[in-house]
Amino acid sequence: MKLLRATLLRLLTMSVTLIGVAVVVFFVIRVVPGNPIAMMLPPGATEDDVARLTALYGLDKSIVEQFVIWLGGVLQGDFGTSISLRQPVMPLVLGRLPATLELAIFALVIAVIVGGALALTGVRHRETRTETAVDVANGVGLSIPDFLWALILIVLFGVLMPIFHISGRISPSLDLPFVTQFYVFESVARLRFDLWWDLLKHMFMPALALAIPLAAIISQLLKQSLKETMHLDYVTLSRTKGYSENHVILSEALPNAMLPTLTLIGVQFTFLIGGTVIIERLFSYEGLGNMAIDAVINRDLPLIQGIVIVFALLFTIINLLVDMMYAVLNPRLRHA
Amino acid sequence: MTAFLTVTNLSAALHGYEQRVLRSVSFSIDTGEVLGLVGESGAGKSMIGKAILGILPSAIEIIEGEILLDGQDLEKMKPADRRRLIGATAALIPQDPLTALNPSRRIEPQITNRLVDILGWTKADARVRALELLNEVHIDNPERVMASYPHELSGGMRQRVLIASAFAANPKLVIADEPTTALDVTVQKQILRLIRELQARHATAMVFVTHDLGVVSKICQRLSVLYGGKIVENSSVAEFFDGPKHAYSRALLAATPKYTDPEASLLPVDEAVIEAAAAEVLAADREWRHGG
Ligand SMILES: Nc1ncnc2c1ncn2[C@@H]1O[C@H](COP(=O)(O)OP(=O)(O)OP(=O)(O)O)[C@@H](O)[C@H]1O
Ligand SMILES: [Mg+2]
C-alpha cells in the first residue's frame, strides 16, 4: 500500500516534470529569433511561398494555439513533422536514440571501471606514492572538460597514432544486417564480432572523452569514502578474523562506501548524456545529439521539441533507476 | 607450563618519533586466565590489544619487543601467516557494538564468515554453530536474529551477537576492549556475566580492558596497571585489593567508588602521585634510550 502510493507519487512528479519541460521548450524556442521556413526555402523564394509553408506547418497561428495543437498530437503519440527532414519527428528521434544510448552506456562502463579501479588502487596503497599518483590523475581528469579530451584524443589516436576511427558510427563500406538501431547489442547477438569490433573502434574515442571526467569524479569520491570506511570498527574487526587487506576492502568496506558514489553516478550520467551533444558533433557520430545540433541550426521547431522531450524522459528514468538501486543496496531504506 | 600469550618488552611509537606510546610492556597470560588491563584514558590499553591482534593504526609501529602467541613469535611471522593465526586463535570483543557490525550485511554471515572463509567450515556447520552460540548468549529467537540487519537490533543484542561471533571459532585468546562501556547500566551487568560465563566454559585466556576496578575484582585473576604506556604494576587481584604495590595504583583504587562508602570514594587522584608516575615514565625512557 505504502509502496503503491510512493510509486504513484513518483509517476506523478515525473509527468509534471515532463510537462514543465515541454512547456518551457515550446515557448523558449519560439521566442528565440530565426525563421525555420526561411531556412528551408532556397534564396529568392516569394513571400507567397513563405506564407504557404508557414501555414502548412501551423506557424501562422498564435503560440498558445500552436501549443494546444502540438500537445493534442503528443497525447496521441504524434510529435509533428520535422521541417528540415520532412518526416514524422518520433521515428526520426527514436531511430537516433539507440546510437546515443550505446555511446553513453559505453562511456559509463569505461568511467565506472577506470574510476573504480583507480579508487581501489589508491586505497589499497594509501599513504604511498601510488595514492599520490591516483590523486594527480584525478586532478588532471577533472580539470579538462570532455570536449577538450575529445580534441586531445583526436590528435593523439586519430592523427599521430591512427589506431581508432575519428568519424562516424561504423565504416560505411560494411554491409549491415541490422534490424534494430542498437548496433552494438545486435552485432553481439548475431555473433558478428567483425561488426562489433568496427563499432567499438568508432565508439572508443568519443566514449573515452565522455568517460574521463566522470572516471575522475568517481575515483575521487569513491576513494574518499573508502578511506573513511576503512577506519570504521566493523572493518577493523574483520581484519582480526584473518581476512586479507584485499578482502577487507572489497567485501567489507566497498559495499557501504559505494552508496554515495552511486548517487553521484546517477546525477553525473545525465550530465554525460548532455555531453554527447557536442562530442557526437566532434566525432560526426550519428546520434541524437548530433541531430539536435542540426535541428537547432535549421530552427526545426518540432524536431527540437521531440528531442528535448526524449532527453527529459531519459533523465527522469535514470533518476528513477538510481533511486531504486539505492533502495535495494541500502538495507536501512529497504526496511524503513 | 608456559603461558599462552607472552608479551615481552613491547614498545610502539608514532612513525619517525622518539616518543613511545607503549613503553617496554611485558606481561603474560595462561590458558583460562583473565588479565585485567586498567589505567586512565590514553594510557595505551587499547593499543596493547591492537598490537597483539595486528590492527595498530597505520601511523603507529612496533619498534621493539616480542609477542609470543601459542609459542609463535608474531613479529617474525609473514603477514599472511600471522593474520591467519590470529583469525584462528584470537578474537576481539569491541567497545562499541553500534559501530562494530557491518550495516549492510545480515547477522548470520557476520558470525559465520570467519568459520567458512578462514577455517574452512561448511556453511551448514557454521550455521549450526552460530545458532548454538546465539543460544549460549541467551538470545531467544536466534533464527530471526541471524536474518536481521544490525540496525534492527538493540545495543545489548548487538553486543551479544559480537560476543557470540568472538567465541564462534573457539578462540584460545579473547581481547575484550571495554566491552560494556557503550551500554546502559542494567545491560552492562548481563553482558559482563555472559562474558565471564563463556570465558569460563571455554577456558579462554582473556585480556579484559576496563576503567572499572570493581569489574576487575569480579572477573580477573590478575591485573596490570598502565600509566603513560608503561605497566607500573603487575599483581594478582587478591594482592592488589589487599594493598597495591605502586602509589599510582593505590590512588586509582582510592578513586574507585565503593558501595559501602560512596562519598569517601570520590577522592581525586593526588597531583603528587600523578607527577611521581610521570617522572617514573620519563626516567624509564632515559634508561631505555641509554640501553638501546
Ligand atoms: N591513530 C593514532 N595515531 C596517533 N596516536 C594515537 C592514535 N591512536 C591512539 N593514539 C595515542 O596512543 C595513546 C594510547 O591510546 P589508547 O587508545 O590505547 O588509549 P586507551 O588506554 O585505550 O584509552 P581509552 O580508555 O580512552 O580507550 C594515546 O595517547 C593516543 O593519543
Ligand atoms: Mg581504549
Image (cartoon, coloured by chain):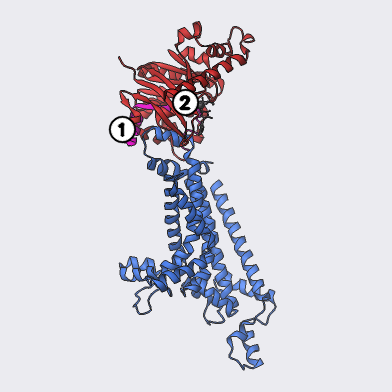
Q: Is residue A18 above or below residue B228?
A: below
Q: Secondary structure at mark 1?
A: loop
Front residue of A15 and A164: A164
Q: Residues within 10 Å of mark 2 (few under 14, many from 20)?
A: many
Return the residue at label 1.
B119
The residue shown at (51%, 54%) is A322
Return the residue at label 2.
B22
Image quarter of residue A22: bottom right
> Can residue A322 be seen at all in this image of the molecule?
yes
**Which is in the foreground here, disc 2 or disc 1?**
2
Q: Secondary structure at mark 2?
A: strand
Q: Is residue B94 magenta?
A: yes
- Which residue range is magenta in the image? B78-102
The chain letter of the red chain reads: B
Image quarter of residue A128: top left
The chain letter of the blue chain reads: A
Amino acid type at mark 1: Leu
Residue A81: x percent and y percent?
Answer: 55, 79
Residue B48: x percent and y percent?
Answer: 45, 25
Q: Residues within 10 Å of mark 1 (few under 14, many from 20)?
A: some
Q: Is residue A194 above or below residue A251?
A: below
Amino acid type at mark 2: Leu
Front residue of A152 and B144: A152
Residue B214: x percent and y percent?
Answer: 52, 13
